[in-house]
Image: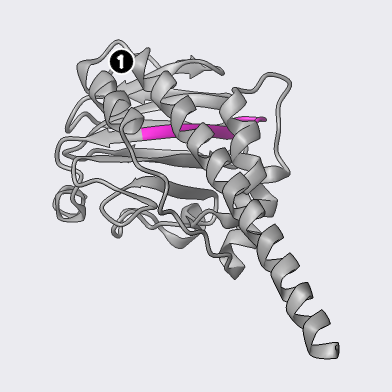
Amino acid sequence: MLNLMRKKTLKIHSFFGRIKKMKEKKIFQNCIGLLADIYAKEDNIEGKNTANFLLGADCSSINFTENHNSKSYSKIFNSYSSKEEHPLVQEVRKISHLLPWYQSDCEGRLDEELKKQMIMTELVGPNSIIYSSQYELGIYFQFPNVSYYSRRHPAEETFFTLSGKSFWKIEEKKEVESFVGDYIHHPSMASHSNRTSDEHLIACWRWSGDISLEGYKNFK
């Protein structure tokens, strides 16, 4: 009798576990759909190509695994908000504890102090949740009052502001303030920098073209 009860309990737990995973996958699919919508509206052919890739992406075999970094960085991400936010932020918050957040030194470009001021998670890419050798996409968070100095890379890049605000400078052009709903495009090898003031920045980014790490390392 006791063994039978245990088996029934295990079946119940297994059933609700499957339901939970289905909900998590659905939320992730919503995130991918929102990203597709964002880049479909970008005034750039590579943005539209990226959107088409996302619309055709298969999310059915995704398995999330929690780890220590996911939980600690998730708490940071979820603790910042602004009055105006893109719906993608709300969806990401629902599964932020499952996403592979990390702090990157950008292949040796960043010092340790600046590295601590930013977290990010890749959703699409060569080593990401959804595999792609052509595109890299993810969610980026930058603390308030942080200056990210000038850099350049072979990949073409577009940021889209989801929450907060920031200031961006490309080459010798005048610095531009970016708010929720704004696109910030960086052509391949264009020098660019950004900073935050009293507000944080949450953005999504996409890379296309040469997205290899070797390409990144060659242009420090």
Residue 196, percent from left and from top: 56, 32
Q: Quick check: is 82 in the magenta stretch?
A: no
Residue drawn at 61 percent across, 35 percent down: 91
Q: Judge from the rendering whether residue 82 lies leftward or rightward of residue 167; answer left or right.
A: right
- State which quadrant residue 58 falls in: top left
Q: Judge from the rendering whether residue 65 lies leftward or rightward of residue 44; answer left or right.
A: right
Across the whole image, how many numbered discs are drawn on residues? 1
Residue 164 visible to the viewer: no
Residue 16, percent from left and from top: 71, 58
Q: Quick check: is 198 in the magenta stretch?
A: yes
97 above or below 87?
below
Front-most of residues 11 and 101: 11
What residue did someone put label 1 on? 173
Q: Quadrant of the N terminus?
A: bottom right
- The single residue placed furthest to the bottom in the displayed view is 2
Mark 1: give few (<14), some (14-19) or many (20+) Cα within 10 Å: few
The boundaries of the magenta stretch are 197-205
Q: Judge from the rendering whether residue 44 lies leftward or rightward of residue 88; answer left or right.
A: left
Residue drawn at 18 percent across, 50 percent down: 212
Residue 72 visible to the viewer: yes
Residue drawn at 31 percent across, 54 percent down: 109
210 above or below 108?
above
16 above or below 6?
above
Front-most of residues 208 and 14: 14
- The single residue placed furthest to the right in the displayed view is 1
